Image (spheres, rainbow, N blue to C red):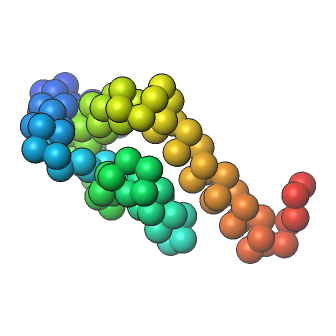
């Protein structure tokens, strides 16, 4: 999908304003149990509210969300330590993988 630079920049600017106001948010396409897990992890670790988005999103909206999340990721990492957001997302991915394996009876293959 094409990145609309003006919208990406608008997302970064909006995020900066939200950080100043203490309104911490993160846009993410979430589903089911792993989406709930992500929501809980972001709130508990960083005080960030996950805004659940659709996978049917126009380039402008997606660009805004990318810009917003890029700036929020910078804020989280500068506040909680390098790679904090990456570690949280890796934990969510591990959770998803465990749930998948449990659901399909795959064990630890």
Q: How many marks?
A: 0
Residue 54: image location, x then y, percent: 33, 60
Q: In the image, residue 95 lies at what x, y percent?
A: 64, 58
Q: Is residue 61 left or right of residue 73?
A: left
Q: Is residue 53 visible?
A: no
Kindly identify the residue that appears in the image at 86 percent across and 65 percent down.
Answer: 106
Q: Quadrant of the C terminus?
A: bottom right
Residue at image position (47%, 56%) is 41
Q: Residue at x 87, y 58 (%)?
A: 108
**Quadrant showing the N terminus:** top left
* In-front residue for pair 13/79: 79
Q: Position of residue 7 (x, y in %)?
A: 15, 34
Residue 58, above or below 37: above
Foreground residue among 43 and 94: 43
Question: At 18% from the left edge and 49% from the top edge, which residue is drawn?
Answer: 23
Q: Is residue 55 left or right of residue 18?
A: right
Q: Nearer the viewer, residue 53 or 35?
A: 35
Seen from the viewer's position, the closer of residues 109 and 78 is 78
């Amino acid at each position: 999908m094409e990145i609309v630079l003006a919208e990406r920049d608008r997302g970064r600017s909006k995020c900066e304003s939200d950080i100043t106001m203490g309104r911490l948010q993160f846009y993410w396409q979430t589903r089911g149990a792993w989406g709930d897990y992500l929501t809980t992890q972001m709130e508990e670790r960083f005080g960030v509210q996950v805004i659940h988005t659709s996978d049917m999103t126009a380039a402008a909206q997606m660009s805004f969300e990318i810009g917003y999340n890029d700036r929020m990721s910078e804020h989280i990492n500068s506040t909680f330590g390098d790679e904090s957001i990456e570690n949280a997302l890796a934990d969510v991915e591990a959770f998803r993988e465990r749930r998948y394996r449990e659901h399909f009876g795959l064990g630890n293959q």
